[in-house]
Amino acid sequence: MRKMFPLAAAFALAMAVHASSAAAATTVRYQTGFEPGEGFTLGNLVGQHNWDQADGALPNVDSTVQNTLVRPTTGGLQAVQIHANGPADNPNADFTDVWTPATTVGAAAIAAEPLVTIKWDMQRGVLAGGQTETALWGIDIYDLGDATIAASIGAYDDSVGPAVAGTNSSGNFVFLGDGTPRGNWDTYTVTVNYLTRQYTVAMNGVTLGTPQSIFLGSNAGIGDVDFLALTRGTDSAYFDNFSITTSTVPEPTATLGLWAVAVGLVRRRR
């Protein structure tokens, strides 16, 4: 054991120095649990704290702050229910975005802190008798023009089972990994690196698939992040604990350099 101690000690020293030197600056851009203490009241979400919705075509969805179904332990007292009222009259505009301009992150902010983390809890509700499923529940990330989507990420069901998908640089959906059945709360984390223009998706702390590129036509800014219903049915999804943070990108070479120093120290002592 004594022979191994210098290596362990040197490695611990390298990690400690790296942790202190590579700590990223982080800024919370938006955060809410839709709680009473934040000023959210039961009833229509639209109009509360500048929340609004854009339905591509009729019929509109219902967006409601409710306290009947919340995430156990971490869900607080309230969550948002989005209930779809059937397919749109125009099949090419069969979507709904529920959003607030407070989720905007400007180009200057992203230039200073280009690592953007978007996190939210979501449950796709169990289908009641006669209900039809919405094809995908999730989020849209719009660029600063609010007309171009940088990426869409969401959960859906198909013939194989529940899954999670995200769009690629062409705007086409790509399978990322297995999802969980309806009725389960899951935490989704999307990390967008605006230097590489790629993003990763994790569900409940586990990364799904491979990094995907954001849409080629989007700029380096966020107009807003929306809750999304795409190709609507007559079901519901529930959203909670929504946050957007930005941070600097850690220097990946720092650890390697310190590790080399640590190994060098060990070799000299041997």
Image (cartoon, rainbow, N blue to C red):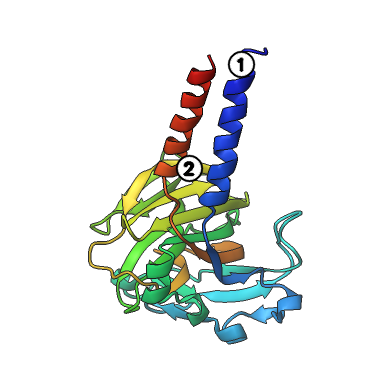
Q: Position of residue 69 (x, y in %)?
A: 71, 62
Observer-nearest residue: 254 or 55?
A: 254
Tell me the CA gap for discs 1 and 2. Answer: 33 Å
Task: Determine the residue positioned at 44% across, 43% down.
Answer: 254
Q: Position of residue 151 (x, y in %)?
A: 35, 61
Mark 1 or 2: the one toward you: 1
Identify which amino acid the numbered label 1 is placed on. Met
Identify which amino acid the numbered label 2 is placed on. Thr
Q: Is residue 230 left or right of residue 25?
A: left
Q: Mark 2 sits on what residue?
A: 207
Q: Position of residue 51 (x, y in %)?
A: 55, 81
Is residue 250 visible from the viewing direction of this image? yes
Give the numbered dot on residue 4.
Answer: 1
Task: Determine the residue positioned at 58% across, 52% down.
Answer: 187
Query: In this figure, what is the number of numbered marks?
Result: 2
Task: Determine the residue positioned at 63% across, 52% down.
Answer: 185
Observer-nearest residue: 261 or 66?
A: 261
Task: Determine the residue positioned at 56% across, 43% down.
Answer: 17
Is 257 placed above or below 115 here? above
